Amino acid sequence: MKLFLLLALLPFLAHAQEEEMSDTDEDREEADVVDDWWWNDQESIPDYFDNSNRGLVSSAIYQGATCGSCGQVSGTQALEARIALVSENWVPYSIQNFMNCDGRVCIGTQPYRMAALVRNSNWIVPRDELPYTKNACRAWGEGKSGCDCGHKMGNKYSNVLDDQFVFIGPTVPAHTEKELKHALQTGPAVTTYTRSGAKKLGAKCKNGGSHANSIIGYNKDSFIIQESYGKGWGNFKNGTWETEADDICGKAILSKAYFTVIFYDYDRANAYYSEVDVEESGLLYLVYASLSFTEKDLSNIGLAKNRCAFMGEHCKGVYKATDGEIKLVSSVSKNGKKNKKGSKNIVTYYRKKQMVIYLKNEESNSYLTIVGKKHPRLGMNSKKKAAPFFTSYGRIISYRRPEYHVVDSKLVKIEGDIKDSRIIDQSNTWALNDCNLKNAGSGESLDLVEDGVGGNPTDLDSESQRFSIGISGKWSLVSSELGKPLLKNKKTNAFTFIEASKTNEAEFRWNAQQITSSLGKPFNANFEQDAGYFEFSQDPKN
C-alpha cells in the first residue's frame, strides 16, 4: 500500500472576586493519559527550587479588582516560562491577547486553556505589542485595538513563535508532591483552588476551582505560589506566597496541578546543535555586512541559533564568549580544532548540523541541482552535483544559497525575514503527495522537462513527477490506494484508515527523523505508539 504525506502547512484582593472557571477536554488534551515516562530516570532534584531565579518568570501583575483573569494571568506566565526554557529565548507574552482571542475578557478560565489556544492558532503576541488593559476592551467596544486577536489581524502583530522553535505537547497532571517537584524542574505549573471558607479550616485555601495561580517552585516542605495581586503583594513583598505541601491548602493545590510539556521543533529550521570544544583563536565569525542578521539576532543564544539555522552553509555554529558577547561562527580553522598539544584557550561553541535533503527523480536517477552564480536556476544532474536543500514548513530552501527557495520550477529570492510567518506566501509552499511535489500557487507539480526541470499538471502516475524528499511540519497520513487518512480509534487506541470528518482528522509530525503524534508521542517501525514522548536522537531507532 502506498502512503503519501499531505501537509497542513502550516493588587487584586483575595476576597474581592472569585469566579468559577470553564473547563473543556480540549484544554487538557492528553492530561488524563499519563505513563511513567514523565517520572522515570529522573535525576535527583534539589530540596529548594524557584523558577523565578532562572530569569524566565514574569513579575506578578495586578489582575484588577473587577477583572476575573487569574486563569489567563497564571496560564500565560507559566507557558511563557516553559517555552523560554526549551527555546532558550524568553519573551513576555500578551495576556490581553489570550483573553481577546478566547472571547473571555476578564471572564475566568482554566489556566491550561492558554496551551490549547496556542495549539489551535500557532500564534503568540508579545506583551509589548498588546499590553494588559483588563476589561477596557469591553468598555471601548468592538473594533478597538485593545480587543484585537493577534493571529486574526493580518500583519499587525508579530508572532513570538517565529523566534521560539517549539510545539506544544500534552498538558499533564502532577497530583503528587513527587510529580509536581519533578515537573517544576522544566518550568512553572498551574493550579486552581478556592479561598472561600478556608480560614475556618485553618488553611490558606481549600479544594475548589474559583481562583488560579502558577506554582513557580518549592522549599523542602512547601510550595511557592505566584499570585496575580501585584508584585508588592504578600508577606514576601514580591507577589508570592507559600503553603505547606501536606496541609489542606497544599493538598488542594496538588489535586488541580497541571503542567504543559514543550518540545523543541527541530524541523522548523531542520538543524540541531551540539557542544564542541575548540581553540578560541580558531573560530572565525560572520559580520553584519556579509549576510542578513542584526544585533537583535545575537541578544541571546536561542535567537542566535534560530538565525544561524536559516543561514545555510554560511553559518557553522554559535559561540558565547566569556564576556557574554554572542557571535555566529563562519568556520573553524585547522588550528582551532581540539586535541592539539599546547592549546592555551579551549572554549565550547554550539556546532550546527543542518538536516539537508536532496531531490532525486527515480525515473532518470538524476538529482535537482543549482546552476549559475549571478542568476541561479534549477537543473538536473548526477548525484555528485546534487544541490542540498532544507525545508521549513512547506518551503524548499537552498542550503548553499539560503536567500533562495524553490517556487514552481524556479529559484526565487526570499523577500524580508525568512523566519517571519506573517510574510510567508502560502502560494509558494509545497505539498508532498505520493512522492509528487505540488506547488500551492500554480497548482502544478515539479516535473522533468527537456532542459531540466519545470512545472506540469499533476499526474500521480507520472514517473517523471516522482521525487524522493521529506518535508517538515504537520500533516495527515493518507493511503493513496484507499483514499483515506490514518485515524486513531478512541475506544481501542488503534490506528486504521477510515473516512475523516472535521472532528476526527488526525495530524502527525515529522520531527528530527521521527514520526510522532501532533502532541509528540512517537511511533515505532510497526507504526505502533511507543511509551513516552519525543526525545531527540542523532540516530533514532524509530
Image (spheres, rainbow, N blue to C red):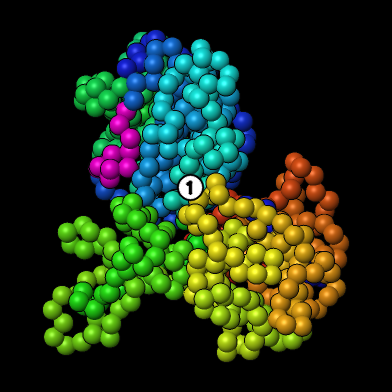
Q: Residue at x 57, y 87 (%)?
A: 385
Q: Which residue is mark 1?
A: 161
Q: Is residue 124 left or right of residue 121?
A: left
Quarter-of-image position of residue 501? top right
Q: How many numbered marks appear?
A: 1
Q: Report if residue 237 is visible in the image.
A: yes
Q: Is 41 above or below relative to 98?
A: below
Residue 361 coordinates in the image, percent (x, y): 71, 80
Residue 375 lies in what quarter of the image? bottom right
Q: Nearer the viewer, residue 140 or 519?
A: 140
**301 vs 428, nearest the viewer:** 428
Q: Is residue 58 magenta?
A: yes
Is disc 1 placed on a helix, strand or loop?
Answer: helix
Badge 1: how crowded within 10 Å, few (<14), some, or many (20+)? many
Tell me the kind of residue under disc 1: Leu
Percent position (x, y) of residue 138? 53, 15
Q: Is residue 130 above or below residue 534?
A: above
Relative to residue 370, is residue 184 depicted above or below?
above
User: What are the residue bounds of the magenta stretch?
Assistant: 48-60
Q: Which image quadrant: the N terminus? A: bottom right
Left or right of 235 on screen, residue 31: right
Q: Give how far across and how far down residue 508 sits, in percent.
A: 65, 56
Percent coordinates x, y for residue 306 in the rendering: 42, 58
Please name the residue shown 75% across and 45% down the image.
504
The answer to whether residue 31 is visible is: no
Question: Could you say which is closer to the camera, residue 135 or residue 294?
Answer: 294
**Residue appearing at x 50%, y 57% in the figure:** 418
Q: Which quadrant would the C terminus be assigned to in this image?
A: bottom right
Residue 269 is left or right of residue 468, and the answer is: left
For the point 41% across and 45% down, the residue is 82
